[in-house]
Image: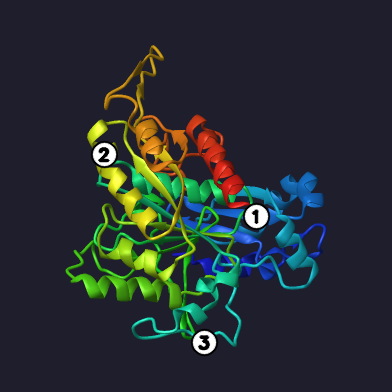
Amino acid sequence: MVTKENVLEALQPVLEPTLKRSLAALGLVRDMMIRESGVSLTVVLHPDSLGQASGVEEDIAKALSGLAGVQPHIRVRAMTERELAEAAGGRGSGSSASGAATAAPAQEAPVRGHGAGLEQHTILHPESGVEFIAIASGKGGVGKSTVTVNLAVALARKGKRVGLIDSDIYGFSVPDMMGIEERPEQVGDKIKPIERFGVKVISMGFFVEDNSPVVWRGPMLGKMLRNFFAEIDWGELDYLLLDLPPGTGDVALDVHQMIPQSKEIIVTTPHATAAFVAARAGAMAIKTNHEIIGVVENMSYFESKSTGEREYVFGRGGGGKLAETLGTELLAQFPLGAPDNHPAEPDFSPSVYKAESEIGREYLTLAQAVIDRCGK
């Protein structure tokens, strides 16, 4: 079977039109996924090159024509201002060609064991510039992970450098939701996160076989979470989202202790009981001096495709009442539904909405609201 390395090697001769350097060597080939139906990838171009995007796509298709069975599905986006500065400085685009993170500075040695000295690690240092956002809920089944995944992707679509930690170590679901099939690779003493839709992802799901259950006591959860900070090569990030387990258990407490500067979004359904339970997660954030930047109400209504009529399956008002209780804002209300994705698509994922879909645009609005509140 064709590998990512085969694809990147074949793309070495394809140049970025403005920079006149190899796309692969500059690290401008991202989000690569290889399936039986072909290969999908994102190409990042200099803004001045966007007018030549069709020619670049033709060059890529021609370069890959020699690889048996490879039918490319190519997406193109423009470089962000930071990527432009990095490319001008000769450092590439900030990501390797395989979509992995930029290596951490050599002087920042990885932290092992129980996470002692984590504050010395680049990503957790208050001056790292990373904005940590924990996504929490009072109970399971309210769509918290769906919100986390789509918010992360929307932030990346806004040009932000985004990481995502699937902190629900017992109930990990992010890899499956994002259509991630590969496993992270270890390079030196660091592990490269998987990059998908422009988001760098790490999850317990990468380290268990055949969807096996994780049977651990509380202290082991905290140790694994510390490893996600200390032993992953995150590179430079603007945002790191954490998909917390539901409730107010060990992992949520560890996050609040390890990242005192993190902010929080609370997810609920409009049902009164769900909002009542979610208030406990919000109260925990308040007691640990974490800023709640808003509430997201999921499954707010069901809209009939035939009539357009809305049915409020789980009642109404829960999100607004929760926001009022916590002294924050209701940031978004998303309907009950699922993305209109098809398994035959090269970049198929069960839970990520397309940018041009109605819900995809609503997530872009949510991402902008988060950016505005974080000032980043």
Q: Nearer the viewer, residue 155 or 13?
A: 155
Under circle 3, the secondary element is loop
Dot placed on the residue nearer the N-terminal end, 2 or 3: 3
Q: Residue at x 52, y 32 (%)?
A: 357
Q: Is residue 37 above or below residue 124?
A: above
Residue 25 x, y percent position in the rendering: 68, 70
The residue to which callout 3 is attached is: 109
Residue 295 x, y percent position in the rendering: 42, 41
Q: CA distance from mark 1 to mark 2?
A: 45 Å
Within 10 Å of the Cα at label 1, are there few (<14), some (14-19), or many (20+) other Cα atoms? Answer: many
Q: CA distance from mark 2 to mark 3?
A: 44 Å
Under circle 2, the secondary element is helix
Q: Nearer the viewer, mark 1 or mark 3?
A: 3
Within 10 Å of the Cα at label 2, are there few (<14), some (14-19), or many (20+) other Cα atoms? Answer: some
Specify the amino acid type for callout 2. Phe
Q: Which mark is residue 43?
A: 1
The residue to which callout 2 is attached is: 276
Residue 71 placement, left or right of 212? right
Can residue 212 be seen by looking at this rendering?
yes
Q: Nearer the viewer, residue 197 or 229?
A: 229
Q: Residue at x 49, y 67 (%)?
A: 3
Within 10 Å of the Cα at label 3, are there few (<14), some (14-19), or many (20+) other Cα atoms? Answer: some
Q: Examine the image and state in which quarter residue 31 appears.
A: bottom right
Residue 46 x, y percent position in the rendering: 76, 55
Residue 342 placement, left or right of 25? left
Specify the amino acid type for callout 3. Ala
Q: CA distance from mark 1 to mark 3?
A: 32 Å
Q: Nearer the viewer, residue 149 or 56?
A: 149
Q: Residue at x 59, y 70 (%)?
A: 128
Q: Examine the image and state in which quarter residue 309 appears.
A: top left
